[in-house]
Amino acid sequence: MSTTRERRPRLPALAALRAPLLLSLANQLLGSGANFVVGVYLARSLALAEFGLYGICYGLCMLYLGVGNALLLTQMTVSMAGQPSAVQAAYAGRVLAGILLLGSVLLLAGAASAAALWRWDAASPYAGLAAPVAVAAALMLCGEFFITYAYIRHHERAALLVNAAALVVVAGGLALLHGAGMAPDAAGVLLLYAGGNALGAALAYLSAPLAWRQPLPQLRCHWRSARGHGGWSLGGMAISWVQAQSATYTLAAMLGPAGAGLANLSRLFISPFTFLVPAVNKIALPRLAALRASDPRRMRRLATRLALAMVLLAALYALLLLSCLGWLAPLLLGYSVPQLPLLVAVWCLVLLFQVGRSCGALLLQTQMKFRQLTLITLPCAVLAVGTAVLLMQRYQAAGAIAGVLAGEGLLALLIWKEIAHGARTELG
């Protein structure tokens, strides 16, 4: 018995996770880092209203990406943990087929929306954006599939290929436009993202082990579970998106695209730290899922330590950011925004709660508690939107961001309360 205990897989130590974490950070730097650089470049190059349009469109792409993650990718990650490679290849092939089908539906909806917008008001700034949003979102989800599949197989280097291809296409396209003296616009940037993700997905497909036609009777129970949990996960994702984007879309509705541009402009400054969150989550989720059945207490202990470390790092980042914002903002943007320090300070508070609730939500997802997570999220989204509408009437952008803060604070509290309740229940 003692020998068996000695050979039992230990809780992943920091040293064991160092190499995959560094690769994950490199992936996130290529992916989200490129988004940040593009955001700064567009903030410098575009009028505030045009920058707001880009933020609105990119937020819609993230909504679709969240749908794909909730219905397919997250379920794939938690269901495939510890499965043999042949089973993983078969499951992944079926998931990719689902993603392609979902993308086809989105493209049809995008074409119909584009036609309706042109017929309704061809002069509207939104008229020419429906089709680029649909194309970019569909191909971004394809790229995200191959990134997620690489992390599940612990082949983090394969994910670099997708992000590197996207970076080359986006950066190369913007460089060509700059060299030609042409200003970028929201539609053009979205199409560059589409092309980059298409190239990355095509290259990754050539080396990814996928079984398209293999019989999958052994996976029926996994699919049944994934469909059941996926519905709750989708609901939770949609509510979380409403909560997180309440500032942008409330300002867009009441102040126009320029209001949304101001919210997104100030949020740029917390974006660099948010690169770290998905990088850590992509490494942690498959490993936590592998511990779910064998040692749930150790799984919960690892997630709690991870959350504490991430919140402390976020607090340190916020302090450093606010201390140097006076010279950093004009350097990045090329101009000054009088209300920017207040807006960034509120976003920093949002960041602390976002990091804490993200790590807690990761643990609930690993435990397959998608229903509880959705029910927890609903009142928080209502609070976020209601607070944003009320406070924006007096404080405008700062009030709208404060609505996000209220929702994120309550959500973090309820998530960790649910985790504590589950721990007490397990202890009896």
Image: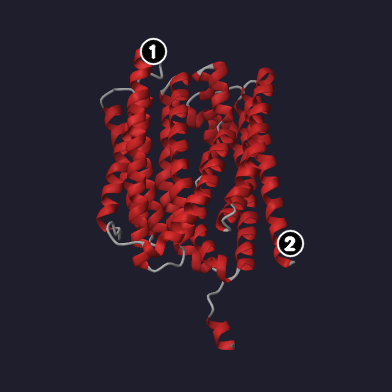
Quarter-wise, where is residue 291 in the image? bottom right
Percent across and percent down for residue 32 are: 44, 43
- Picture layout, residue 359 above or below residue 106: below
Tell me the kind of residue under disc 2. Arg
Tag 1 residue: 120
Residue 29 left/right relative to 187: right
Q: Label 2: few (<14), some or many (≥20) within 10 Å?
A: few
Residue 70, numbered circle: none
* Comes first in the chain, label 1 or label 2: 1
Residue 158 left/right relative to 405: left
Give the residue at x 42% y 58%. 151
Residue 309 left/right relative to 139: right
How many numbered dots are placed on residues in this image?
A: 2
Tag 2 residue: 424
- Picture layout, residue 129 above or below residue 30: above
Tell me the kind of residue under disc 1. Trp
- The secondary structure type at the circle numbered 2 is helix
Percent across and percent down for residue 111 are: 32, 26
